[in-house]
Amino acid sequence: MNVDWIEEYEKEDKSYKMFYPEPVSRIKVNILYVNKKNELEKIREEFIYLSVSNLIKKGELIRLIKSYDISDEIKYKLVSIVVYNIDIRHDELKNYLSGYEKYNFITSLRNIEDYELKSTLNYLQQINNIYIVFNEEEKKEIPSAIKKIRTYDDNTNTSTNTSTSNSKHKTTKRVKFSLPKKKTRRRKY
C-alpha cells in the first residue's frame, strides 16, 4: 500500500500550522502605573506561564497584583484589569484585516476570579495580553487623639487629673490613639 501521499500531506500541513488555533499557555502582562496627576508614569512588562492552558487562575492574578502594587517605594492601588484575547478563526482572518472594527477581543475583569481564555491562532499568540492598571495612592494622614485617663484614689473614690510622683495611687496618664478619620471602636456589651 502506498502511504507517500500521507507524508506529503503532513509536510504541507506543517506550513499551515501557524493558522490553527492552539491553547494559550503563556501570556504577556503589562503593568501600567498612573501617578497622582493621572499621567502614565511607567510600564513594566513580563511573560507568565499559565499553570493550566487557557486559564488565568485567581491565585496567579493575585500574585501579580501583590508583586507590583509597590514600585520605587510608592504604594499603588489596583484600578483595572483588562484582558486582550484574540480568538479569531483562520477563515475569518481575511474579514478581520479588512474590517477590524467589527471585532472586540477586550474584556475588563470586574472581579478577581479565574478567567478562561480562548484558543488563539498560533501565529497570533504573541498578541494576547493582560493589562493591569495601578493608580498612585493618596497618602492619608491619620488623625491622632490624645485622651486623658483618670485614675481614682483608693481611699476617697475621687478622680484626679494631676500627676504626683510621691503617691502610688494618684496618676494621670496620657495615651495616644491613632484612629482612621470618622471611625471609632465601640465595645459590644
Image (cartoon, rainbow, N blue to C red):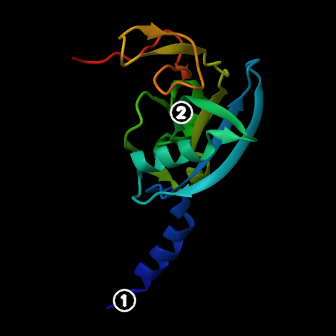
Q: Position of residue 160 (x, y in %)?
A: 49, 10
How many neighbours does mark 1 have within 10 angstroms: few (below 14), some (14-19), or many (20 or more)? few
Q: Is residue 136 above or below residue 125?
A: above
- Viewer-closest of 111 and 150: 150
Q: Amino acid at mark 1?
A: Asn
Give me the disc on residue 2.
1
Which residue corresponds to the image point at 45% horizontal and 23% vertical from the top-left?
169
What secondary structure is found at the residue carrying circle 2? strand
Which quadrant does the C terminus fall into?
A: top left
Answer with left or right where residue 96 lies relative to residue 74: left
- Determine the residue positioned at 43% across, 85% down: 4
* Residue closest to the eye, 54 or 180: 180
Q: Quadrant of residue 137?
A: top right
Q: Secondary structure at mark 1?
A: loop
Q: CA distance from mark 1 to mark 2?
A: 53 Å
Instruction: Give neighbour class at mark 2: few <14, some 14-19, many 20+ (Cα, 10 Å).
Output: some
Is residue 118 visible in this depiction of the protein? no
Q: Which mark is residue 82?
A: 2
Query: Residue 165 in the image: x percent, y percent?
Result: 60, 25
Image coords of residue 147 (percent x, y): 53, 14
Residue in the image at 35% along x and 11% along y: 157
Counting labels gives 2
Viewer-proximal residue among 140 and 176: 176
State the quadrant of the N terminus. Answer: bottom left
Circle on res. 10: none
